[in-house]
Structure formats: structure tokens, C-alpha cells
Image (tube, rainbow, N blue to C red):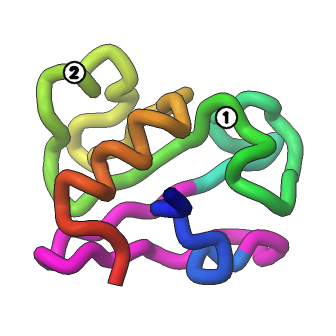
Amino acid sequence: MDLLNLEKLQFGEDTNKRLTCKDGFWLSVQGDRDKYSKPREKCYNAYAYDSMEIMASELLPPNFKKYLDNEKNRIYGYVPVEMIESLLASHGGVC
């Protein structure tokens, strides 16, 4: 299942656009040398990353706490791609 919806992420731009889910939850998904991602380089496919940096519209469930870098801005670093997919699915998927 392609929940990250690569065309909506618009890889290749300096900053990827927000992904909005069917229930209104949004998530910014980033990967690059200046981001908390592995690898720390610009890839043009989300599945080239093992983990990515995300910023969410709300604080995430407890299983994301160990990735939380900045609670005020809701920034999470080195989040496994599989967890990002599950999170998007839990909000109805990307619209």
C-alpha cells in the first residue's frame, strides 16, 4: 500500500508539502542532509529512506515519544517509514 503518496510529497523540492489525511490530521514528511532522516541525503523516493523527520498537527501517540525532538513544534526525528505509513492509515489515509 502506497500510503506516503509520493506525488503528493513532491520530492525534489526544498521542503515537501504537508500530507492531509481524510480526518483533517496533517503530517509533514522530510528527508535530506539537514533533516533527522536515514540516509541523511536527498532521495527522490520515500522508500529510499529507513526513517524520516516528521512534523504533525498534534502530538502523536505514546509509541512515537522516543522520536520526539521538539514537543512545542511537534517535530519527530528518525521515525521509521513503516510507522509513518501506519500513522497515516490510522487517520484514514492521505486525501
Q: Which residues are magenta?
A: 11-29
Q: Residues within 10 Å of mark 2 (few under 14, many from 20)?
A: few
Neighbour class for label 1 at 10 Å: few (<14), some, many (≥20)?
many
In reply to whether residue 23 is colored magenta, the answer given is yes
Specify whether 88 is left or right of 84: left
Name above or below for residue 30 compared with residue 6: above
Residue 91: percent from left, percent from top: 18, 61
Name the amino acid, label 2: Asn
For residue 6, which quarter of the picture? bottom right
Does residue 15 appear left or right of residue 3 in this picture? right
> Residue drawn at (29%, 47%), measured in percent from left and top?
87
Of callouts 2 and 1, the N-terminal one: 1
Location of residue 72 (image quadrant): top left
**Numbered tag placed on residue 37 in the rendering:** 1
The spot of residue 7 in percent (x, y) is 66, 81
Q: Which one is in front, 38 or 94?
A: 94
Compared across the picture, whether 18 is left or right of 53 comes to left
Q: Which mark is residue 63?
A: 2
What's the distance in space between the residues labelled 2 and 1, CA to CA?
A: 18 Å
Callout 1 secondary element: loop
Circle 2: element type: helix
